[in-house]
Every structure is written in structure tokens, then in C-alpha cells.
Image: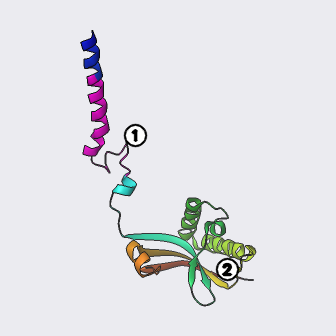
Amino acid sequence: MRAMHRAWAYAVSVALLALAIWPAFRRPVIDDSFPLSTFPMFSASRPRRMTITHVLAVHADGTREPLPPSITSDNPEVLQSMMTIRRAAFAPPDYRAKYCRTVAKRVVDSGNDEWDDVEQLEIATSLYDAVDYFEDGPEPLKRRIRHRCEVHR
């Protein structure tokens, strides 16, 4: 009886050890699942270039700066703001104009001194090289302005 318990304990131990080691032999991106994740969002290779649609504040000196979510969507949530901007950027021109005017009003109403010299807003889609962004600066490789509006004070 004691030998059977010992054999059962060994079998369970080997099975648990095999389950723990098994993910090391899977294809990480394709076979990711519960309960043992290989975190493919960190382990898989990513493209260097990425496209971002954003609202840019154009200052009096011509510099451009992305507006924060609290201004672009009246909401601090980054992903919700991103979707609001994308929806506006790819909407018909009259919707884009209305959205731009709404954001311009938020800039004025924000009371933030940082935005006092903002003259225009641009709804833009910009292409960035992720490595160059951090090595050479935040200038995009390419930018398409989808809409531009004045900030009236």
C-alpha cells in the first residue's frame, strides 16, 4: 500500500513538473493561453514604424504638441481619447470641423497657461519610427493633416 502511495506521489510530481516546463517548448505568439502566458505582447517582435492619429496644438512659434486626453475627449482615458480622435479624423468634413471647434473651445476653457499661445489645432495622422523617435527626436517621418482649425480667444 505504501509503495502505491509513493508511486502515485511520483506520478503526480512528474505530471506537475511537465506542465510547468511545457510552455518553454511552445510557439510563444501562437500558443499563448491561460494559465501560463508567455506574454507575447512583450516577447514578439514589433514593427519599428507606427501610425498615430492625434490632435496637435500649433503654438505661435510654429511648434506642434499633442494635446492630452483631457482636452481631446474631455476624458482622462487614453484609449477612449484615441478612439474619439480616430472617429473624428476619418469622419465626414463637417463632423471633423465640429470636433475641432469643440477641442479648440476646451483648450481656451482649460485655464492652462501652457495653451495660451496655441493658435491652431490640427487633426493629423503621423508615421513614426519608434527607434528614431527616441534617438533623434519626435518629428514624424510623414504627417497627413486631416483637418485644421483656429483657436479663437
Q: Position of residue 27 (x, y in %)?
A: 27, 48
Kind of residue indicated by mark 2:
Glu
Q: What residue type is labelled 1?
A: Phe
Q: Is residue 76 above or below residue 29?
A: below
Relative to 114, does residue 40 appear above or below in the rendering?
A: above
Q: Is residue 32 magenta?
A: yes
- Which image quarter holds the N terminus? top left
Q: Is residue 11 above or below residue 18?
A: above
Viewport quadrant of the C terminus: bottom right
Q: Residue at x 25, y 44 (%)?
A: 25
Q: Name the residue under label 1.
A: 34
Closer to the camera, 48 or 136?
136
Q: Position of residue 31 (x, y in %)?
A: 31, 45
Mark 1, secondary structure of its residue: loop
| Boundaries of the magenta span | 10-39
Is 37 magenta? The answer is: yes
Name the spot of residue 49 as percent of width and height, x first.
38, 71
Label 2 belongs to which residue?
114
Q: Which residue is drawn at 66% across and 69% down?
A: 71
The location of residue 72, given as percent across then percent down, is: 63, 69
Residue at the spot x=73%, y=77% of the render?
A: 108
Q: Do the residues labelled 1 and 2 touch (CB within 8 Å)?
A: no
Locate residue 68: give its quadrant: bottom right
Disc 1 to disc 2, C-alpha distance: 46 Å
Q: Is mark 2 on a helix, strand or loop?
A: helix
Circle 2 residues within 10 Å: few <14, some 14–19, many ≥20? few
